[in-house]
Image (cartoon, rainbow, N blue to C red):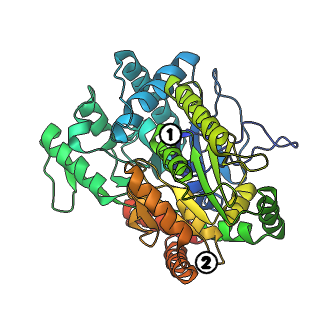
Amino acid sequence: MRQSSLVVVANRLPLDDSTAPDGACEWRRSPGGLASALHAILQQTPATWVGWAGGTGEAPSLPDIGTLRIRPVGLSADELHGYYEGFANSTLWPLYHDAVEQPVFDRGWWETYRDVNRRFAEAAAEVVEPGGAVWVQDYHLQLVPQLIRELRPDVLIGFFLHVPFPPPELFMQLPRRVELLRGMLGADLVGFQRPQAAHNVAQLAVKLLGAPVTANDQITVDGRTVRTGAFPVSIDVTEMQALAARPDVRDRARQLRTDLGRPRRVLLSVDRLDYTKGIEHRLTAYSELLRDGRVKVRDTVMIQVAVPSRERVENYRVLRDRIEGEVGRINGEYGRVGETAIHYLNQPFDRADLAALYQTADVMVVTPLRDGMNLVAKEYVAARADDAGALVLSEFAGAAAELADAFLVNPHDVDGLKETLLHAMEADQRDLERRMAAMRAHLTSHDILAWARAYLTALDRTGRIAAWLRR
């Protein structure tokens, strides 16, 4: 088995579910998402990616993607249910998102989660070279850092949590809270989107482990120092700008406007279909604006893209049915022949189509109830080379800390959301240009490579790993 000096461990491999006509595997890209975040980095860095390829049964034999080596991990149907649909997405996901939906605690799910985490750790331990680095990603694999430490104490171990980390009073509800905390603290560096998350972990380390903690949230566990910190993830700004500048994408944006009936204003939302994204609150606000006559269907169109997500999980099927029912009600009540109030698209979109949609939208509405970062907001800003357009952004998305010139809103406050939408729709063009230019300038210097360099430099203080990103 060939070994790599950098190993990324994530729940999913960054692959399309189908191969290209010539049999080659390709990157799987989705709105936001881990594969999008790491795409630019691993295109130019010699590395191995350990992850699940999708489906059930034995791990398939998969070719590498350019210089990126692929190491699949297989899951049985029972493991998929207990580890992924169960403990990861029905226990941890809702709890980490402020219990927007009630978490489910199931002892059997925990055992499966633990066993699958061990399998990922063993796969990573096999493929990392002596003295190399393993970078573990996200809540699905929170036990993996400590398990790798037990197997390969010679390697550097990083862990990055892409979702929010909850306040201690919520985390304390977890029946296996000590094991989960110790699993994460098996890393040399634990990274988060926001500083508050690092502080939450430090408080828990004191409370649950009696661990010494410094003023900057460094934690001493088992005689070693675990560093924590905030490393806000970003996007490949150059790629999105190039995509948005392509003539075919610009033509597609113009055609979309024509297809929509050349409305005066287009509102756009692009989300995974998830209860944390605030889709229902957004629909309620827009419906009431139509009801009150403050927005007219004849001159304003809303597009809601809801990319299918976790369709085997019952809560997600129920959510999809509720949203589809509400869209149907709004269109039935306020639409006219040839004038649809809301265009609802429950389907994946490729990168070019997303770039065209971003350029079509006068107002981008990103209003999650809770979100670790939200890369869609950053993609919209990067795609608007004209500095036009308005970004309405939830205060509870990690991106709000960086994109302070967006129209920030509390999505739980439907009246406030309505007023903010109107403010964005009616804003002076010079104000919009000022806001967008400031946000674009920030993103240019805080792109995905800057994120990776910052994290990997903090992980490996020699600068050896981060230097790969300058090749």
Residue 387: x %, y % from top left: 61, 77
| Residue 286 seen in the current view | yes
Tell whether 140 sits left or right of 15.
left
Q: Residue 410: which quarter of the image? A: bottom left
Q: Secondary structure at mark 2?
A: loop
Query: In x, y percent, where is residue 383?
Result: 65, 68
The mark tally for this picture is: 2
Which residue shows up at 69% across the image and 43% down it? 348
Above or below, 286 relative to 41 = above
Disc 1 + disc 2, Cβ < 8 Å:
no
How many C-alpha atoms fall within 10 Å of the one at disc 2: few (<14), some, or many (≥20)?
many
Q: Earlier in the sequence, mark 1 or mark 2?
A: 1
Q: Quadrant of residue 88?
A: top left
Give, as a three-letter code, the residue at label 1: Ala
Q: Position of residue 244 (x, y in %)?
A: 72, 68
Residue at position x 37%, y 37% in the image: 100
Task: Answer above or below: position of 150 versus 243.
Answer: above
According to the picture, the residue beneath numbered tag 1 turns out to be 124
- Relative to 96, is 247 above or below? below
Q: Quadrant of the C terminus?
A: bottom right
Residue at image position (71%, 45%) is 64
Q: Amino acid at mark 2?
A: Asp
Nearer to me, 389 or 240 = 389
Helix, strand or loop for disc 1: helix
Taking the spot 64% from the left edge, 36% from the top edge, the residue there is 328
Residue in front for this viewpoint, 201 or 148: 201
> Where does label 2 land, which residue?
387
Q: Is residue 138 left or right of residue 198?
A: right
- Judged by depth in the image, the label closer to the viewer, 1 or 2, is 2
